[in-house]
């Protein structure tokens, strides 16, 4: 089932954009993220070190998994009126 995730740079504030990762694990692996980001070619996508770790395309800093959740457990947000 797809997992919603985004890589985010805490150093310069760059967000790499949200991707859907096909995994059944609780959090995606670096390799799964790489495959997912390869599909969304272009602007803002992370660069990858030889070790397989994602790095920021703007400042070269370490990227963090900002949020991740399974689609199935995602509930619609209720709007306070
Ligand atoms: Zn950065």
Image (cartoon, grey):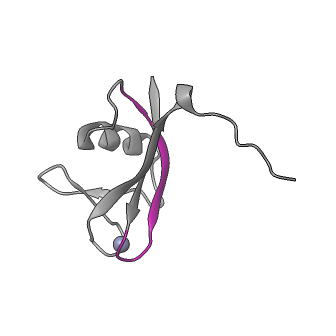
In the image, residue 81 sits, relative to residue 4, either above or below, namely below
Along the horizontal axis of the image, is 81 left or right of 32? right
> Residue pushed farthest right?
81
Whether residue 14 is in magenta: the answer is: yes
Q: Residue at x 44, y 69 (%)?
A: 14
Q: Which residues are magenta?
A: 10-23
Residue 68 location, x and y as percent? 44, 43
Whether residue 77 is in magenta: the answer is: no
> Which is more toward the observer, 77 or 4?
77
Along the horizontal axis of the image, is 29 left or right of 17? left
Residue 19 location, x and y as percent? 47, 43
Q: Residue at x 33, y 42 (%)?
A: 33
Residue 53 visible (yes or no): yes
Report the number of discs.
0
Q: Quadrant of residue 71?
A: top right
> Which is more toward the observer, 64 or 31?
64
Q: Residue at x 39, y 45 (%)?
A: 37
């Amino acid at each position: 089932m797809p997992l919603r995730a985004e890589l985010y740079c805490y150093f310069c504030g760059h967000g790499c954009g949200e991707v859907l990762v096909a995994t059944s694990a609780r959090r995606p692996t670096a390799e799964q993220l790489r495959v997912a980001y390869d599909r969304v070619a272009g602007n803002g996508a992370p660069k990858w070190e030889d070790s397989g770790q994602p790095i920021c395309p703007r400042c070269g800093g370490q990227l963090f998994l900002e949020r991740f959740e399974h689609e199935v457990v995602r509930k619609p947000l209720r709007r306070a009126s």
